[in-house]
Image (tube, rainbow, N blue to C red):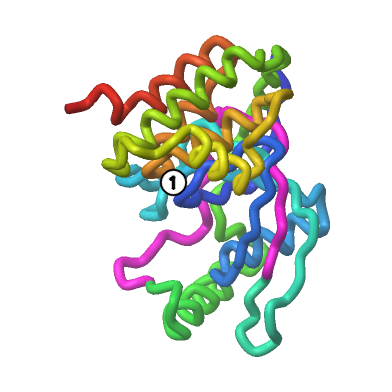
Amino acid sequence: MSNTKIIPIFPLDLVLFPNQDLPLRIFEPRYKQMVDDCMVGEKEFGICLGHESATISNWQAPYDIGTIAKIIDCKDVDSTSGHLFLNVRGRRKFRVIRLIPPSLEKSENYDPFTIHGIRSVEQSHHDIGVEKKMYIQAEVEMMSDIEDSISLVDWENLVEKWKQKIKKTSGNNDLTSHQLDHVLEQYYLKTETPTMEYVHSLCALASETPLDLQPILECTSIDQLLEKSAKLLESDINSE
């Protein structure tokens, strides 16, 4: 029987991979409450790519597979705005078993970027009880890590596909392998000892939207990771 636990969920327009660092600016009342709760607990929450259409209590719903984010540090950006600045690091992947709706339903005219929008949420939260959770929570199960290593041959094959994709999408077939190696160097992706983090970063470099990366995050084996990565890197090469 798998172990499950309940964690806060933060849907975002991005995919966080394990061992990846991510800076976040927090300003909405529901996520400031989430951070406060995390700081007195395990300093962890779940980051998922947000659905473009699915909702829960009118808020954007998350995809079923995400990554635990560990808070490395948290500080106020400035005392006037009340914004928080977080540095988080991706840990293990998880699968959502069930979603727990937030205590507040999103109103049609809610605008998180205005003083009025923020105060209206704060007032609604005060009315229902400040102990209620404004953010989405979920019961999740941890997914097993992919323990196999990436061979240099497989890595070089992916890099070559990336180079072909860049030539195609840029419309510049005169780009040399040396010039593209320089781009990889700038992103710290020149290596003879590749890891899954290198594959994740190469895919992120080649992606057009976060939706491109969700299938990469969902991989459960090294063969699946190589297959999905190659598919992403070949997506524009074979389309005419």
Numbered label tally: 1
| Residue 147 screen position, x and y as percent | 72, 15
Q: Which residue is outermost to the bottom? A: 80
Does the segment drawn in magenta span residue 108?
A: yes
SS class, disc 1:
strand
Query: In the figure, 60 relative to 114: above or below?
Result: above
| In-front residue for pair 31/199 | 199
Magenta span covers which residues? Answer: 85-110
| Quadrant hosting residue 40 | bottom right
The residue under the point 54% across, 69% down is 28
Quarter holding the C terminus?
Answer: top left
Relative horizontal placement of residue 128, taking residue 55 as reference (left or right): right
Q: Main secondary structure of the magenta part?
A: strand
| Quadrant hosting residue 84 | bottom right
The residue under the point 71% across, 52% down is 88
| Residue 2 screen position, x and y as percent | 70, 17
| Residue 65 screen position, x and y as percent | 53, 31
Does the segment drawn in magenta span residue 104?
A: yes
The residue under the point 49% across, 78% down is 118
Query: In the figure, 2 relative to 72: above or below?
Result: above
Q: Which residue is outermost to the left? A: 240
The residue under the point 55% across, 28% down is 97
Name the residue that disc number 1 marks: 50
Relative horizontal placement of residue 156, taking residue 44 as reference (left or right): left
Of the residues shown, which amino acid type is indicated by label 1? Gly
Q: Is residue 7 visible?
A: no
Quarter holding the N terminus?
Answer: top right
Q: Is residue 122 visible?
A: yes
Relative horizontal placement of residue 213, taking residue 189 as reference (left or right): left
| Residue 172 screen position, x and y as percent | 30, 41
Crowding around mark 1 (Cα neighbors within 10 Å: few <14, some 14 to 19, many 20+) is: many
